Image (spheres, rainbow, N blue to C red):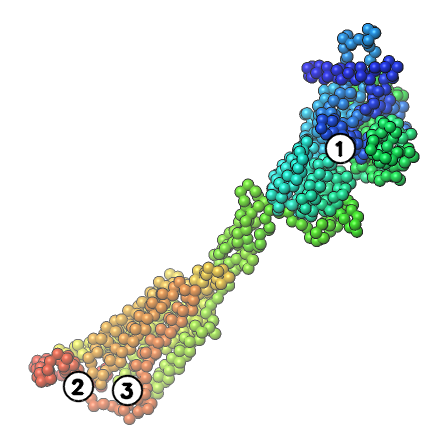
Amino acid sequence: MVKALEFYGCLLMLTWVASSVSQRTDPLLPLAPEYAHSIRLDGDIILGGLFPVHARGERGAPCGELKKEKGINRLEAMLFAIDLINKDPDLLPNVTLGARILDTCSRDTYALEQSLTFVQALIERDSTDVRCPSGEQPIFAKPDKIVGVIGAAASSVSIMVANILRLFKIPQISYASTAPELSDNTRYDFFSRVVPPDSYQAQAMLDIVTAMGWNYVSTLASEGNYGESGVEAFVQISRETSGVCIAQSLKIPREPRPGEFDKIILRLLETPNARAIVMFANEDDIRRVLHAAKRNNQTGHFLWVGSDSWGSKISPVVQQESVAEGAITILPKRASIEAFDRYFKSRSLSNNRRNVWFAEFWEENFGCKLGMHGKRPGSPKKCTGLEKVGRDSIYEQEGKVQFVMDAVYAMAHALHRMHRDLCYGYLGLCPRMSNIDGKELLGYIRNVSFNGSAKTPVVFNENGDAPGRYDIYQYQISNRSAEYRIIGHWTDQLHLNIDVMQWASGDSSLPPSVCSLPCQTGERKKVVKGVPCCWHCERCEGYHYQASEFTCQLCPYEQSPDQNRSGCQPIPIIKLEWHSPWAVVPVFIAILGIFATTFVVATFVRYNDTPIVRASGREMSYVLLTGIFLCYVITFPMIAAPGVIVCSFRRIFLGLGMCFSYAALLTKTNRIHRIFEQGKCSVAAPRFISPASQLVITFSLISVQLMGVFVWFVADPPHTIVDYGEQRTQHPENARGVLKCDISDLSLICSLGYSILLMVTCTVYAIKTRGVPETFNEAKPIGFTMYTTCIIWLAFIPIFFGTAQSAERMYIQTATLTVSLSLSASVSLGMLYMPKVYIIILHPEQNVPKRKRSFKAIVTAATVTNKLSHLASERPNGEVKTELCESVDNCTPSTKTTYVSYTNHAI
């Protein structure tokens, strides 16, 4: 701290001495030239002021051209505010405010040099080494003691100056510096501001970008604290919210080279989708960026979002209105001060001599020249001094005038309260305020609260920041006139009227500034690594739906994606309908079979006592016909809508019809086989060949099937299921759930397996009895029936199980099963009973009793016929008869001869 004070003291001494020597070459000259480049107003309390009266100089020059609005207007606002305070009897009564106002020339280093003037009174001068030419002791003018500073404008200047003022504990109130860095109360503890920091501004600008639907933007900043801090705050907030991505972040150098702005435009065009450009740049840089965009034929491409440095200023858009059209800018909420307009318009060369730069402003504003020493040597027009601001020139109140006045009033209110506490009842300054403590004054500044010049509250938080209140503008061109139009405001949250916005394209819809277009419904975003706002759209395939913006999820098994894949919907449930071709054909066959079976049964009942019916075995025939009837009937529960009752019928009758049929046929063939095998060696009739015995055997075989069904019922009660895997196609829209009974392929095989076993056994016996003469029995028709039935079921197996993976599985398998059952029944009905019905109905003359023959005669005839058929295929014709006769004689028993009437044992 001591070293810093010594450094600044030495620097100040050198500056002051050099200035004094150069300005007092003539002892008759007054001390006034010391203030030739500053404004000095006498008063009891002196406030410092820092304003960018001139622009930054070029080619090494410290200062450039005059800045009318940001310089003169703001400077005059401070003077006007001081005048009002000094006239106000209620604010600092009997105390006069003075001022020492300096020009920063929009350069931080130059402003630092100038601001040393503010701390002169706080540094003791060592004059031992300084002598006048006459050798006398020099007399130094007593410098003004500055109690507080109003300014500066640029954040970079305020930061540089604040570092010095805090060393000398001089409070500072800025009217335009918005860099977030200045909110650091540990480094800039004596700094306050009546404008909100850029952290609020950055949040407001991010809210604007978000509300416009722009998620891919570039940033452009002027080199320095204001631009870089603003962009840094914007980028930081955008990262925290993860809603906006930064395509490019470019910086404009302090001293740009020729062609630098064209390069910036070309760089921005490298990411053409990032049309929105967020700008934290000074007024000069904004103007040159717009000009470069116009020069590169990019009018209408970029969507400018400007900070408060652009605000509602005219100068950045002059002669480049078309390229600036549609620009959205932000400005701290303000109001035009009419009293200041009257004051400023009344200023003239004669009544405003206190402003040392006013003559230069006069020349610049009216485009004329003041005498031989004017600042505009090339101007042919001479100023008369009678010109009037607002009448002979364009005038518009500069946007920060309100904040300059608020900053001065904030300092005045703090001094007023300090005076009230320290000098209560004392007229003028009391001794306690003769040497104002800057730290104590800072406490009063942070606690002020009053309505400012625009009737808005002026307060400071613990960091010296003002609350964020912004107006949002859009630069619009209509009817050949251009203006900034308020389209919303921001106070902690955004209020934006999108309906009043206009764009260069003439389209009312919002122009895009996105890296990737939104994905369609049913598509997920596959984000590009490192760039969360850029993505590729991938459609949710198969049975997946769009669960979120970035993920696809598999629908539950019983559901499929809806049409736009935004959710899942139940898979439609189907069943075999009666009108389906897969059902019509089996039903038609079954109905024909039922009618035919009914006709046969009715015929047998009608002619129950005729020889043919009796010879067919009436009891077994009715059992067989019952099975045939059930084989036809099962078609209907197999096609009917599945339910508990229907499923129960399916389980019971699926194999029961076949079991009835083949149990009866097996009993018949077994009886024939036993009779003729027994008759070969014995004339005694085999046991269990009576009708009652045959029925017992048949129902015993059927009971096995019924017992299996009963066990099945107990172990797994019948119920329905919806099979979603049977018709689960690659295209979810074609997927269907099949309503079916819970009968698996294994259960089906078990249910039909026993009947098929009976059928195979019956076929074996049919083969064994194939040699019995058909004149005496039904062995051959039964054989043909079984052969045909086997062929049918051999064809059934590959068709039924080979279509297990087919989408039409339910239809094919049901139709195949029912048709196979009907065909089996039809074969039995056609081969075993239709010939008998034919004789009974059409040839009743043949339905007469035959001659009674003994059991021995029947067996002998069958044996002879069998051997004759066998030997005829192996021996010459002359040998056959001899061998056959010998064989018959040898087979005949010599001890006992018994004859059995065939009447009671019809085969």
Instruction: Tell me, yes or no, if residue 323 can be seen here.
Output: yes
Instruction: Tell me, yes or no, if residue 660 can be seen here.
Output: no
Which mark identifies residue 661?
Answer: none
Label 3 or label 2, whichever comes before in sequence order: 3
Q: Amino acid at mark 2?
A: Ser
Is the residue 126 above or below the residue 280 in the image?
above
Q: Residue at x 66, y 37 (%)?
A: 259
User: What percent of the width, then of the height, locates residue 714?
Assistant: 38, 62
Q: Name the residue that disc number 2 marks.
A: 854
Q: Name the residue that disc number 3 marks.
A: 612
Question: Which residue is more in the foreground, 225 or 744?
Answer: 225
Q: Name the residue that disc number 1 marks.
A: 176
Q: Amino acid at mark 1?
A: Ala
Question: Which residue is more in the foreground, 290 or 626?
Answer: 290
Q: Secondary structure at mark 1?
A: loop
Q: Residue at x 75, y 38 (%)?
A: 332
